[in-house]
Image (tube, grey):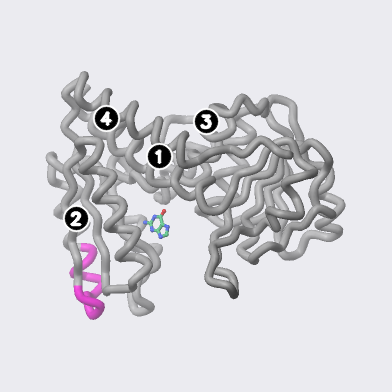
């Protein structure tokens, strides 16, 4: 049976460390969270982010804007928050309603306050090895692996998924750790055979229980980025956990694996932003 990488415990450790740091160093951080419209899933995420801030001692400002908010109104709010010295992080909850231009909104956030790590300057810095905010889910995966003593140096890492938020930054972070990286996507030939090469398989394909035991090598480490609600109402990932767990050496569960790490790393980015400002 595989070692279960406990994202709940590791994220809780990180949050506790941040709480201690904020208290000890007297860091006064503030995160601004903007939600446009009232998508229920987004409302849950926003509530969880506010709660995490409160637990750690980060203040938060929430802007719940009506669904009919215009591009100009949203850009004006971001402009004000960019100028506000008391705000250290700006997060616009995605997805935005269809009439808004998401790219223009992300580009408008000051890179100094881009705690999501989505701004092209943050992405560029990551790819050339300069300091900058890193997208929270892939940063959380690196932290999960490090804290579970999974060696990355020289290992074959196969990432399935090439999104701007997970797959691409994940590849850059794995390169930084000296892994040999392969990024797969919908046009990849022989996906199963490529995945079988992996020492570390990162599943971010967005399809419930897609990866069964035929995709993984004996003794490999499997990180499941997916989260879906299956027919029976239970949560599941991109990996068919029950089929894979007996074959691999370590695996993240869903829920309780990668998911909780995203908010922990967002909190880390907020604290880092405020610390840098106060330096
Ligand atoms: N929507 C789903 N995940 C995220 C995230 O990590 N950041 C933002 N801004 N929106 C999201």
150 in magenta:
no
Tell which quarter ligand 1 is in.
Answer: bottom left
Q: Which residues are magenta?
A: 66-75
Residue receiving disc 2: 79
Q: Is tag 2's residue or tag 1's residue first in the polypeptide sequence?
A: 2
**Label annotation for residue 183:** none
Q: Are circles 4 and 2 on residues that touch, CB within 8 Å?
A: no
- Using the numbered discs, state the Cα–Cα distance from disc 4 to disc 1 in whole angstroms: 13 Å
Mark 4 or mark 2, whichever is nearer to me: 4
- Using the numbered discs, state the Cα–Cα distance from disc 2 to disc 1 in whole angstroms: 25 Å
Cβ of disc 3 within 8 Å of ligand 1? no
Q: Are circles 4 and 3 on residues that touch, CB within 8 Å?
A: no
Q: Is tag 3's residue or tag 1's residue first in the polypeptide sequence?
A: 3
- Using the numbered discs, state the Cα–Cα distance from disc 2 to disc 3 in whole angstroms: 28 Å
Q: Place residue 181 in its image quadrant.
A: top right
Q: Quadrant of the N terminus?
A: top right
Q: Is tag 4's residue or tag 1's residue first in the polypeptide sequence?
A: 4
Residue placed at 51% from the left, 33% from the top?
143
- Using the numbered discs, state the Cα–Cα distance from disc 4 to disc 3 in whole angstroms: 28 Å
Mark 1 surroundings within 10 Å by alpha-carbon count, few (fewer than 14), some (14 through 19), many (20 or more): many
Nearest the eye: 236 or 39: 236
- Using the numbered discs, state the Cα–Cα distance from disc 3 to disc 1 in whole angstroms: 19 Å
Residue receiving disc 3: 129
Asked if 47 appears above or below 274 in the picture, the reply is below
Residue receiving disc 4: 19
**Label annotation for residue 265:** 1
Nearest the eye: 154 or 26: 26
Q: In the visual, does 125 lie left or right of 153?
A: left
Residue placed at 25% from the left, 36% from the top?
56
Under circle 3, the secondary element is loop
Q: Where does the image place residue 60, in percent across and percent down from the top left?
A: 18, 47
Q: In the visual, does 214 lie left or right of 169?
A: right
């Amino acid at each position: 049976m595989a070692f279960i990488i406990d994202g709940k415990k590791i994220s809780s450790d990180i949050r506790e460390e941040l709480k201690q740091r904020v208290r000890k160093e007297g860091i006064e951080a503030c995160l601004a969270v903007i939600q446009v419209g009232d998508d229920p899933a987004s409302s849950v995420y926003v509530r969880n982010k506010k709660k995490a801030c409160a637990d750690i001692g980060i203040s938060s400002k929430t802007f719940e804007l009506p669904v009919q908010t215009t591009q100009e109104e949203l850009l004006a709010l971001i402009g004000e928050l960019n100028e506000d010295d008391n705000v250290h992080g700006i997060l616009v909850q995605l997805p935005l309603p269809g009439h808004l231009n998401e790219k223009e909104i992300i580009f408008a956030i000051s890179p100094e306050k881009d705690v999501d790590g989505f701004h092209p300057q943050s992405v560029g810095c990551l790819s050339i090895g300069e300091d900058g905010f890193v997208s929270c889910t892939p940063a959380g995966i690196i932290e999960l692996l490090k804290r579970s003593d999974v060696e990355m140096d020289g290992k074959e890492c196969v990432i399935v998924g090439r999104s701007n938020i997970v797959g691409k930054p994940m590849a850059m972070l794995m390169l930084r750790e000296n892994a040999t990286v392969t990024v797969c996507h919908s046009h990849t030939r022989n996906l199963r055979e490529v995945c079988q090469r992996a020492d570390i398989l990162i599943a971010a394909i967005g399809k419930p229980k897609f990866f069964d035991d035929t995709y993984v090598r004996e003794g490999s480490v499997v990180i499941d980025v997916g989260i879906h609600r299956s027919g029976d109402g239970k949560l599941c990932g991109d990996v068919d956990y029950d089929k894979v767990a007996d074959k691999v050496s370590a695996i993240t569960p869903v829920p309780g694996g990668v998911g909780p790490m995203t908010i922990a790393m967002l909190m880390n980015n907020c604290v880092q932003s405020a610390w840098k400002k106060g330096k």
